[in-house]
Image (cartoon, rainbow, N blue to C red):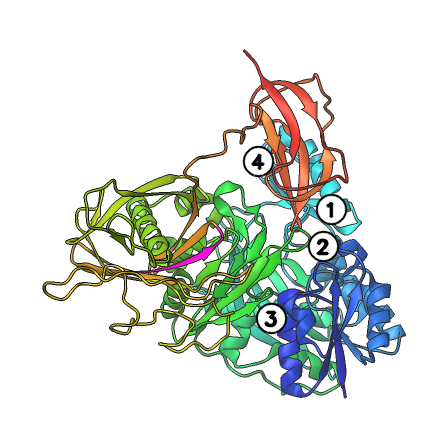
Amino acid sequence: MIRSLLVANRAEIARRVFRTCRDLGIATVAVHSDADAGAPHAGEADAAVRLPGDAPADTYLRGDLLVEAALAAGADAVHPGYGFLSEHADFARAVRGAGLVWVGPPPEAMEAMASKTRAKEIMRKAGVPLLDPIDPAEVTAGDLPVLVKAAAGGGGRGMRVVRELDALPAELDSARAEAASAFGDGEIFVEPYMEGARHVEVQVLADTHGTVWTLGTRDCSLQRRHQKVIEEAPAPGLDGELRRTLAESAANAARAIGYEGAGTVEFLVSPAGRAYFLEMNTRLQVEHPVTEEIHGLDLVALQLRIAEGEPLDPEPPAARGHAVEARLYAEDPARDWRPQTGVLHRLEVAGLRVDAGPADGDAIGVHYDPMLAKVIAVAPTRAEAVRRLAHGLERARIHGPVTNRELLVRALRHPEFEAARMDTGFLERHLPELTAAASDDEGAARLAALAAALADAARRPATTTVAGRLGGWRNVPSQPQLRSYRAEPDGTEHEVRYRLTRDGLLAEDFPEVRLLSAEPGRGTEPRRGTETRRGTAAGWGTAARRGTEPTLGAEPKSGAGPRPVTGPGPGAAPGQAAAPARVVLDVAGVRRTFEVTDYGDRRYVDTPRGCHVFTALPRFPDPTARTEPGSLLAPMPGTVVRVAEVKAGDRVEAGQPLLWLEAMKMEHRVTAPTAGVLTALHATPGHQVEVGALLAVVTAEE
């Protein structure tokens, strides 16, 4: 029996495993880097062991330190999670060699699937259908497009789609370099790229007694940069024969390598409905919750029981309903999926399963994957599950770095996705429309900026009377109140002018808007998970008590002037947000409610239709905030991993790659903004840079 388990991982997967351990009565041990010292997973475990350093290579990828940590903390088993060392056979051997239980497949099975080229040879012998690789030196124009792939690792690293023969040599070199950097193995191979294919996978579970379960299918076709974004189970639109082929092929693959534990066999399904083996992941998958939800299983609990030698039932439980999962990433899809950093002030999604890594108040850094959470909806039908997920994401409170939330909502509501007509090129094909401003976005943003201005006014203390001014209302003619905001991340500026008169709100450009109420938040915003009842001091939508807490702009009784504003109560402690203000407007006869939360100069305006983020602008901007024309600034904190063969004084073309930054497990190419002369190059490989750091300067041609 396993009594104490160390999870050799971090964030969401560590918390997920700990949750099951608590249910099973198993003590838990966390490991953490210095960057993760205050992370939730480190605090939730019964014990935690520090791994000195920040970078994965110094911490979570150090198998020797992980084994030492397990022994020091008295653990008797190790769960690898996913990513990092979860598919490294040598780590599994080291765990077993130390007398610990390895919660995963045998090292030999992992080794068999570690190289995609070797895996294909094994699968061919097992009768599993697959695509034949192409010798890179023999690729012809008739073979295009082709896919260049790293033989080791995953997550889209070292993967390139090549559509032009002339581009192949450079892409081969680039893929080799990225694969060597990411996995320590520069081996690559080439295979046909299947246009319009779907990514479909089968969850397998195998015990030590010869029983192999196949738990239906999952569709993971919605991907960016070959990394999954939206997954669902079961995969829609597959006929009975194809489902049987997938299940039999997955079971044959597991048996061919003597598999034990949880794993996933992945396939490409052609538009004609033919399945081809892609790879086998010898670990638990990020998207495992959708399978759990429709089968009523806890896959982590089953992993632990298999590791303890318990047998599976002869047949798995049947699937019921449909589940859809969306990965919430700290990234900006409209700007080349650029990863985002900063403090995650608040993450709250009501009514859905949320498997999150960080908690409210945590800093999102550059060292690890940008995924913040997985949000999962389950319902009797696919249409209902998709609708629930889109609705829940749209109404979620997500305050902090820019995320892909809006893209997720739009993708889920796209006609092609709703009709289950998706493939691996879906996001790339539809990215412009999924990230473009909607026709009504400008008007909605302006209205949200007005709500932010009224919330700011409601929070101002009203304890003095000067020139007839009381709580923001002037009894004499005056200039309008002026507030300016910059919308994030697009940079659009909104200038709000309004007056509060005896007749109510007069806002320029909003002739059909009436202010019904604007309530300042009380105290500080509670952390996620804190129970807050209506009417408590937390200030979440608290109704003003007549005579004690009057509200700005409340509709007056007959013959009465507008009520004055009270102060916001106790101020927020440093680093905390004041509780959200609540602004209610009548817009052409329709009542609209806005929840406005401040974090320094940032304003998050939440509505039932989504969130608007603004930066409050000072009245007098800093005239020194300038950069030299042609300056290339670091778009994110990260590490310079490669620099092109250029030097100061060289002529460069517009769009020519100059260097590559790595942040959050992804490489980002920095290119020349214009044709001209490279007059300065400040980056060197291995150099750590902060956001906004000057990397290079390109002086444009006359």
Element carrying mark 1 = helix
Q: Secondary structure at mark 2?
A: loop
13 falls in the magenta region: no
Q: Which residue is mark 3?
A: 203
Does residue 593 appear to the left or right of 627 in the view shown?
Answer: left
Q: CA distance from mark 3 to mark 1?
A: 26 Å
Residue under label 4, please give it.
163
Q: Which residue is mark 1?
A: 179
Name the quadrant of the N terminus.
Answer: bottom right
Q: Give the percent coordinates (x, y) of residue 633.
A: 61, 33
Q: Earlier in the sequence, mark 1 or mark 2?
A: 2
Q: Residue at x 76, y 82 (%)?
A: 4
Mark before the other along the chain sequence, 1 or 4? 4
Query: Which amino acid is tagged 3?
Result: Gln
Q: Position of residue 159 (x, y in %)?
A: 65, 45
Crowding near the residue tagged with mark 3, few <14, some 14–19, many ≥20 C-alpha atoms within 10 Å: many
Q: CA distance from mark 1 to mark 4?
A: 20 Å
Q: Is residue 555 above or below residue 482?
A: below
Quarter of image, res 254: bottom right
Type of amino acid at the residue the image marks with label 1: Ala
The magenta stretch is 593-600
Q: Which mark is residue 153?
A: 2
Residue 594 belongs to the span the image colors magenta: yes
Q: Position of residue 2 (x, y in %)?
A: 76, 85
Q: Residues within 10 Å of mark 2 (few under 14, many from 20)?
A: many
* Kind of residue at disc 4: Arg
Q: Quick check: marks 3 and 2 in contact, CB under 8 Å?
A: no
- Is there a contact, CB below 8 Å, between mark 1 and mark 2? yes
Precedes in sequence: disc 4 or disc 3: 4
Q: Please name the amino acid that badge 2 sits on.
A: Gly
